[in-house]
Amino acid sequence: MSRTNFLRGGVRLPLELPVEVHWKGRRGKKQHAHGKTVAISGNGFYLILPKRLAHETPIDFTMDLPVELTRIPMKLAGQGRVVRGKLSSAETGIAAIIDDYHFLLAAPEV
C-alpha cells in the first residue's frame, strides 16, 4: 500500500465549516483566504478555497467548530501542508495534512 493511499484511508466526516487559511506566497508575501471544509479526518481535511496553493505549501488554518458538537464556541487552529489540489472553473479543492493543532475558545456571538 502506498503512503498516499494509507493517508487517504482514514474515516472522513463530511463537515462544511468556515475556515481561514494563511500561507506565504512565492515571494514570501503573507497571503490568506476564506473557504469552507468539505470533509475532515484525523489526519487532515479537504476544503474549497478561491485560491490555488502549490503542493507542499505550509499553511496555518483556523476553523469554527459547530457548537452542537463542542457545546461552547470553539475554533480549531493549527499548521499543516497541502498534499494535493483539484482545480475547477470557479474554485479550488485542496487536501491538507494536519501537522499540529490546538483548540481555541471563541467569543460567543451576541
Image: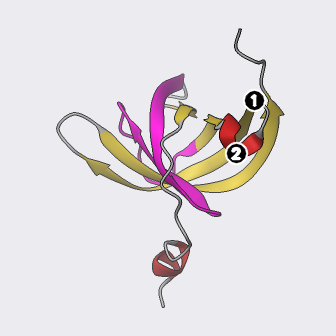
Circle 2: element type:
helix
Circle 1: element type:
loop
Height in image: 109 above or below 30? Answer: above
Q: Is residue 89 left or right of residue 71?
A: left
Of 66 and 4, the residue lying toward us: 66
Height in image: 95 above or below 3? Answer: above
For badge 2, the amino acid type reads: Leu
Q: Position of residue 72 (x, y in %)?
A: 79, 33
At horizontal 55% and vertical 70% (from top left) the residue drawn is: 11
Q: What residue did someone put label 1 on? A: 73
The quadrant holding residue 75 is: top right
Residue 28 visible in image: yes
- Res 69 label: 2
Q: Is residue 103 left or right of residue 90?
A: right
Neighbor class of circle 1 (other Cα within 10 Å; few <14, some 14-19, many 20+) is some
Residue range corresponding to the magenta coloring = 30-58
Of 88 and 58, the residue lying toward us: 88
At horizontal 75% and vertical 29% (from top left) the residue drawn is: 73
